[in-house]
Image (cartoon, grey):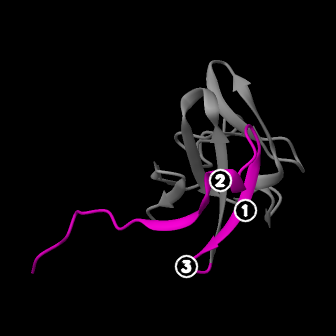
Amino acid sequence: MTVSTQQQWQTVCQLTDLIPQSGVAAKINNRQIALFYIPEHNRVYAIDNYCPFAEANVLARGIVGDLNEQLIVASPLYKQHFNLQTGACLEDDSVKVACYPTKIDNDSICISV
């Protein structure tokens, strides 16, 4: 059996569809993903849109910021903070949301889910 380790990229949107320092939700393979464009990093971060504390797809509506030198999004309902690079919840070590690799290809935002 051969296992492929090559990432499969899917174009999600254009860079102009995203608002800097803000989130946008996209549905990919029946899963809601929150995309965050951070121009200072020249990068788009992608995490699950589902907040495990609120039990709702709301993370794309959260506030992006820096907390303890970590790039985070604060859940808009109960205010837990999730690291955009690792998905870890800063308030509860046992909680984590999935993160997805992204790349900017010309002006297209691509994600590997």
Indicate the amino acid at tag 2. Leu
User: In front: 110, or 50?
Assistant: 110
The structure residue drawn at horizontal position 48% and vertical position 60%, both measured from the top left corner, is: 111
Task: Identify the mark nearer the N-term, 1 or 2.
Answer: 1
Mark 1 and mark 2: Cα distance apart in space: 6 Å
Disc 1 residue type (three-letter): Ala
Residue pointed to by mark 1: 25
> Relative to 43, does residue 47 appear above or below in the rendering?
below
Of 89 and 16, which appears nearest the observer?
16
Task: Give percent across and percent down for residue 45.
Answer: 57, 46
The region drawn magenta spans 1-30
Number of the label disc, if any, that sits on residue 62: none
Residue 41 visible in this rendered orientation of the protein: yes
Please say whether residue 51 is visible from this viewpoint.
Answer: no
Of the pair 108 and 85, the residue shown nearer to us = 108
Residue extending farthest to the left is: 1
Q: Residue furthest right?
A: 77
**Total numbered labels:** 3
Label 1–label 2 contact, CB within 8 A: yes
The residue drawn where x is 20% and y is 70% is 4
